Amino acid sequence: GENVEQHPSTLSVQEGDSAVIKCTYSDSASNYFPWYKQELGKRPQLIIDIRSNVGEKKDQRIAVTLNKTAKHFSLHITETQPEDSAVYFCAASGYGGSQGNLIFGKGTKLSVKP
Amino acid sequence: DAGVIQSPRHEVTEMGQEVTLRCKPISGHNSLFWYRQTMMRGLELLIYFNNNVPIDDSGMPEDRFSAKMPNASFSTLKIQPSEPRDSAVYFCASSLGLGRGAAKNIQYFGAGTRLSVL
């Protein structure tokens, strides 16, 4: 089945700097890659997603890139702000008999220091 | 829409007791997912349903765990008997459905149930 690896597990940056979180997946048939943000004590919430037919997607300060050949995708946050501090999860969606279920990475705890 | 609704928000019980967690998915969503989150193991998929039918329960840790979805608007996750190692936050999520549709895969999470087994 699908396996998703996420790095780093913790990331500390200064306010205004960029943050990059990387994930790799194992199933070449996976076609949907969302990123979730989870603030302390809250539920995971979708912040951006990308499908296998595109290589990059941007939404204001957030961007995601996908390399299907290498089977990895990354989250880029520019001009980080203290409110970006949270745990970020990448995920990959299965295909075939497991269409739609998400396999999550272990998460990256991002701390943005003012 | 109020989103995915889970109850209770917090549950404290003693080892050996039965625990039932409840979830109401977003109206119109056909897929429902149960996850368990712990510091050690992260976010684990336990089981998911499509059109009220269990599709994959390979993530259910053992026979003490069971899940049902009697109708499109309600699901339960039951632990009997509960053990201290079951302590975790349990999330329910729903999506429009399975398959390759543009919006189908987006999962919306409930607020979670924090379970403590003493």
Image (spheres, coloured by chain):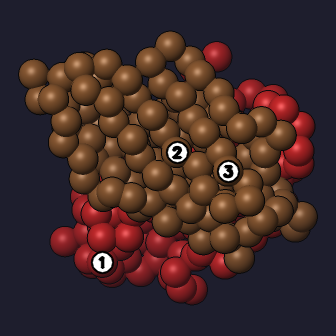
Task: Work out whether residue A8 or residue B31 is closer to the camera in this orientation and state it.
Answer: A8
Q: Chain A appears what colour?
A: brown
**Left or right: A58, with A108 as reference point:** right
Q: Position of residue B69 (x, y in %)?
A: 73, 55
Which residue is more in the foreground, B93 or A97?
A: A97
Q: Residue at x 60, y 56 (%)?
A: A72
- How far is disc 2 from disc 1 in space, using C-alphas? 33 Å
Dot 2 falls on which chain? A
For label 2, the crowd category at 10 Å Cα-Cα, with few meaning under 14, some 14 to 19 and many 20 or more, is many
Secondary structure at numbered mark 3: strand
Q: Are marks 2 and 1 in contact (CB under 8 Å)?
A: no
Q: Color used for chain B?
A: red
Q: Which quarter of the image is occupied by the N terminus of chain B? A: top right
Give the structural element (helix, strand or loop) at label 1: helix
**Are tags 3 and 2 found on a single chain?**
yes
Q: Badge 2 is on which residue?
A: A74
Q: Residues within 10 Å of mark 3 (few under 14, many from 20)?
A: some
Position in image of residue A55 (x %, y %): 71, 38
How many numbered tags mark residues here? Answer: 3
Chain on which label 3 sits: A
Please report contact status of discs 3 and 2: CB closer than 8 Å, yes or no: no
Q: Quadrant of residue B105?
A: top right
**Amino acid type at mark 3:** Asn
Q: Is residue A67 above or below residue B41?
A: above
Q: Gap in Å between the C-alphas at discs 3 and 1?
A: 38 Å
Secondary structure type for disc 2: strand
What's the residue at 40%, 29% (across, down)? A77
Q: Earlier in the sequence, mark 3 or mark 2?
A: 3
Residue type, numbered disc 1: Arg
- Residue at mark 3 to residue at mark 2: CA–CA distance: 9 Å
Give the labeled residue for mark 3: A67
Above or below, B118 relative to A64: below
